[in-house]
Image (spheres, rainbow, N blue to C red):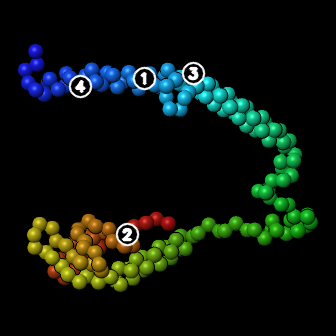
């Protein structure tokens, strides 16, 4: 019936496994388990846990309703984020006058700021030195500060590497509007 020994062993194990499964099921649901509860005990425990959780949920909802029953006036009275008004109305008028809006920057101010930023970028780039240039191969590269850079890379301060040759690197500073 079974051609090889492996299939005979599998067939012989089936009745043994059925007996073990039957014993486990019988011990759990017929009251023969070591906990001594069986299925009825498990159902009772589950029902008690369900009722307890429902009761706790109802109590939590009642507490939430009590907490949300605070009237608006008392909440505003105890608001820690409320802005305190000055006691003296004249003092309030003086404080309002002292807060002046900043003036709009003029074109001269903007060009001055742009020039300062450009000088900062140039000084940042000048602090970093080109220590090596490699022009052989497909794409030239350079050791700029502690980084290897290639054409198209962005440097500190936003400058872009435009060209790399034996004399060093050529960069383009970013054109930012203020």
Instruction: Please name which of the two marks, 2 or 4, marks the residue nearer to the observer.
Output: 4
Q: Nearer the viewer, residue 104 or 119?
A: 119
Label 3–label 2 contact, CB within 8 A:
no
Res 99 quadrant in image:
bottom right
| Label disc, if present, on residue 93 of the rendered structure | none
In the image, which disc is placed on residue 40? Answer: 3
> Closer to the N terminus: mark 1 or mark 4?
4
Near mark 3 (Cα within 10 A), the count class, few <14, some 14-19 or many ≥20, is few
The residue lying furthest to the top in this view is: 1
The answer for how far apart the CA atoms under marks 1 and 4 are is: 19 Å
Question: In this view of the protein, which residue sits in the foreground, 140 or 81?
Answer: 81
Which residue bears the numbered disc 2? 158
Image point (28%, 75%), residue name: 147
Residue at image coords 87%, 47%: 74
In the orientation shown, which residue stands out farthest toward the left?
Answer: 3
**Dot 1 corresponds to which residue?**
25
Under circle 1, the secondary element is: helix
Ranked by sequence position, the earlier of labels 2 and 4 is: 4
Q: Is residue 109 left or right of residue 148?
A: right
Of residues 145 and 139, the one drawn nearer to the viewer in this rendering: 145
> Disc 2 and disc 4: Cα gap in Å?
74 Å
Give the distance between the C-alpha atoms of the residues marked 1 and 3, in whole angstroms: 14 Å
In the rendered structure, are the residues bearing label 2 and label 4 in contact, judged by CB atoms less than 8 Å apart? no
* Sequence-earlier tag: 3 or 4: 4
Q: Position of residue 28 (x, y in %)?
A: 47, 25
| Discs 1/2, front | 1
Q: Position of residue 23 (x, y in %)?
A: 39, 24
Is tag 3's residue or tag 2's residue first in the polypeptide sequence? 3
Q: For numbered disc 2, what is the local secondary structure?
A: loop
How far apart marks 1 and 2 lie (CA) works out to 73 Å
Distance of mark 3 from mark 4, alpha carbons? 32 Å
């Amino acid at each position: 019936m079974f051609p090889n020994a492996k299939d005979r062993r599998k067939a012989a194990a089936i009745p043994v496994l059925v007996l073990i499964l039957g014993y486990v099921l019988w011990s759990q649901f017929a009251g023969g388990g070591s906990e001594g509860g069986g299925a009825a005990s498990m159902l009772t425990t589950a029902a008690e846990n369900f009722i307890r959780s429902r009761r706790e949920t109802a109590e939590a909802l009642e507490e939430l309703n009590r907490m949300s029953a605070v009237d608006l006036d008392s909440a505003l009275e105890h608001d820690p984020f409320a802005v305190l008004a000055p006691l003296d109305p004249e003092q309030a008028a003086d404080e309002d006058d002292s807060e002046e809006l900043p003036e709009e920057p003029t074109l001269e101010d903007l060009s001055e700021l742009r020039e300062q930023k450009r000088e900062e970028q140039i000084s940042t780039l000048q602090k970093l030195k080109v220590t090596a240039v490699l022009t052989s191969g497909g794409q030239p590269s350079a050791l700029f500060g502690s980084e290897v850079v290639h054409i198209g890379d962005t440097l500190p301060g936003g400058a872009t590497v435009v060209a790399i040759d034996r004399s060093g690197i050529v960069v383009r500073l970013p054109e930012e509007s203020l």
